[in-house]
Amino acid sequence: MAKDTLTITDNRTGKSYELPIEHDTINAMELRQIKVKETDFGLMSYDPAFKNTAATKSSITYIDGGKGILRYRGYPIEQLAEQSTFLEVAYLLIFGELPTKDEYAAWEYDITHHTFLHENIKTLVQAFRYDAHPMGMFISTVAALSTFYPEARNVDDADVRMYQIKRLIAKVPTIAAFSYRHNRGLPYVYPDNELSYTGNFLSMLFKMSEPKYQVEPALERALDVLFILHADHEQNCSTTTMRAIGSSKADPYSALAGAAAALYGPLHGGANEAVLRMLREIGDVKNIPEYIKRIKAGEFRLMGFGHRVYKNYDPRARIIKKVADDVFQITGRNPLLDIALELEKIALEDEYFVSRKLYPNVDFYSGIIYQAMGLPVEMYPVLFAIGRTVGWLAQWQELVTDPEQRIARPRQVYVGAGERQYVPIDQR
Ligand code: CMC
């Protein structure tokens, strides 16, 4: 009978080792027994950028990148985007199951009643320059929250953890909206507890002198779906950062600020902003062939294309295309959509992109929707961060309660100078 093991023969010594295989992986620590001399450190695996290393067991999100499958806690993303709400998905990701009616009502009440920020946070946001990037303000403000809730450092206390989880999910839209209003030189709008999670966010962004902000239901729903699609994506760069910081038992505000900083980069959550800038730069469908030529020559990348895990159409991109249609019914068609559609068509037929399995990812169309909603490009990564906050927290909670986890501390292969003697500066 076939055994779930792997036999490795070390040709340096002729010795064989039988390593157990579990979940199609071997435990990297098993390699350490492979030595030439007893005093050796033992074999390690070398994996820059963790391309083939599982750093955790997780029961939150499942992705099959080859088939283009994404599921949260077993539920297909398509069903959740169609039938669920962002707050219900948040509950699912945090608790592992869909809520009952009563559980959902209590959850919604709790999140709604933690949306206010301490007044001093306003002073903090006001201290930024008028043109500060909202993502910089978002990251700093989330980090600052840890000083308002010092008990949050008791990360091994389940009740304390849940309190911070609710606070963070509730407060990130308020922080995001304050950063937007700051950029515009507009007064900050306080949360309206009578509105939904996304309705309240739209109110905090766009309310002017009217006594009550009238939420456009189609835009409220579109934003809710976009938050669902961005809620989690297993061990991506920012989630890995959340887990790495969390592994030192730092409080979740500090860890989440670090995760948001990782998201900020143009190869990750900053890509939606980069896509919009790219579409504007292309400017006209007739300029696309020349643009593609330059991408193929390696001058720059086609933003919103390609993914470390998906080697097929990103299922989120498919859903977003439908959301875009709903939004454009209200806002009118975004002319950049024509450039995006043509770019996608050409890229999907071009040998360069086909052979590298480069398909549109979640960020290819999200920016076009945000733009149609009247949001400036700098806000796009912040919108990503609001949705992803839920995933970061679910993953952080899983990490903190996982008995197999320790402080994250990768190894290195040292390739620098051997020992040398210090030479005083006047003798160099
Ligand atoms: N445009 C042109 N060529 C590309 C692109 C692209 N967008 N992405 C990958 N390639 C090429 C790359 O040059 C390389 O070619 P070669 O083998 O000839 O050197 C090959 O495809 C493999 O690329 P890689 O850099 O090894 O792939 P990766 O898995 O390390 O990178 C990625 C994944 C997402 C960083 C990359 O595809 C990329 O930079 N895309 C553009 C940025 C983007 O849209 N990011 C959003 C990701 S989805 C949202 C999120 O989760 O944050």
Image: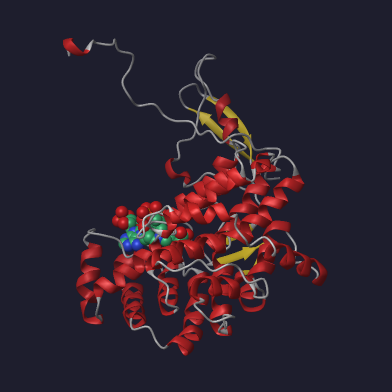
Where is residue 63? Give x, y as percent: 57, 60
Image quarter for ligand 1: bottom left
Question: Where is residue 275 shown, x and y percent of the image?
Answer: 35, 68
Residue 333 or 213: which is nearer the viewer? 213
User: Residue at left 49%, top 19%?
Assistant: 36
Residue at 62 percent of width and 37 percent of height = 249
Vertical order, 77 against 398 (above or below): below
> Residue 330 in the image: x percent, y percent?
48, 88
Q: How many marks?
A: 0
**Residue 281 rendering spot, x and y as whole percentages:** 25, 71
**Residue at position x 56%, y 30% from top?**
31
> Which residue corresponds to the image point at 49% horizontal and 77% vertical from the top-left?
208
Q: Is residue 182 above or below residue 394?
A: below
Residue 355, picture quadrant: bottom left
* Front-most of residues 411 and 218: 218
Query: Coloring scheme of the render?
Result: secondary structure
The answer to whether one can see residue 139 in this image is: yes
> Is residue 249 left or right of 44 when viewed as pictured?
right
- Decide which of 46, 20 is in the foreground and name it: 46
Rendered view: 274 above or below 157: below
Q: Quadrant of residue 190?
A: bottom right
Q: Tell whether 331 sits left or right of 386.
A: left
Residue 64 is at least partly visible in this image:
no
The C terminus sits in image quarter: top left
Quadrant of the drawing holding the N terminus:
top right
Left-right relation of 187 to 54: left
